[in-house]
Image (cartoon, helix red, strand yellow):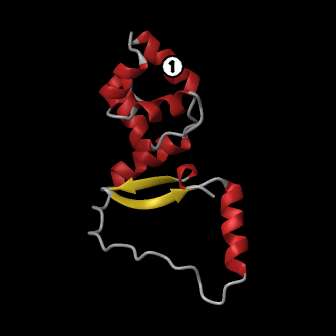
Amino acid sequence: MSKERVQVISRNGEPEYAVLPYADYLELLRRAEGREAPLAVAPVPERAPEPAITSARAGVEKAVADTPFDPAELVRLRKRAGMNQSQLAKASKLGMMNLIQIETGQRQPTASMRADLARALRVESL
């Protein structure tokens, strides 16, 4: 297993998740089975709790999350708006790689990302 095959996802500048290929995950489990002590885990730093989402916002985000996302529709709306990927990424404050992955269906956008994209495209929702 090599480090370049692991993607670290951060929140508020702190590492939160590590994404690795499934085969590497299985190998880690296999290696851990023979150990008497659990694998050493780095302590998670304390951080302030995130502000609670208001019930109205939570309801909107749930409704958006429950609506299927169509990457082809995003591409169609972007082109209709006369934007290229770089312009939409900048206007929506998403990274270029995130936008490419969303448009190709390799990544599902979060409710927040969908709201940012809709705002940048000047549409009600995605």
Q: Residue 26 appears at what percent x and percent y?
A: 71, 64
83 or 68: which is nearer to us?
83
State the image quarter where residue 85 is shown: top left
User: Vertical placement of 122 versus 60: above or below?
Assistant: above
82 or 34: which is nearer to us?
34
Q: Residue at x 32, y 34 (%)?
A: 93
105 or 5: which is nearer to us?
5
Residue 98 is at least partly visible in this image:
yes
Q: Residue 72 appears at what percent x and percent y?
A: 57, 22
Q: Residue at x 31, y 27 (%)?
A: 90
Check disc 1: other Cα within 10 Å, few if <14, some if 14-19, many if 20+. Answer: some
20 or 52: which is nearer to us?
20
Using residue 34 as the reference point, say whether residue 92 is left or right of it. left
Using residue 56 as the reference point, say whether residue 63 is left or right of it. right
Q: Quadrant of the N terminus?
A: bottom right
Outermost residue toward the front in this view:
2
Badge count: 1
Q: Residue at x 41, y 45 (%)?
A: 60
Q: For the residue labelled by badge 1, is the local secondary structure a helix, a strand or a loop?
A: helix
Residue 126 is at least partly visible in this image:
no
User: Vertical placement of 6 versus 71: above or below?
Assistant: below
Q: Residue 104 appears at what percent x and percent y?
A: 58, 28
Q: Residue at x 69, y 74 (%)?
A: 31
User: Vertical placement of 121 versus 57: above or below?
Assistant: above
State the image quarter where residue 47 is shown: bottom left
Please give the residue where the numbered disc 1 appears in the rendered image: 75
Q: Residue 98 appears at what percent x and percent y?
A: 46, 35
Outermost residue toward the bottom in this view:
36
Task: Identify the amino acid type marked 1.
Answer: Val
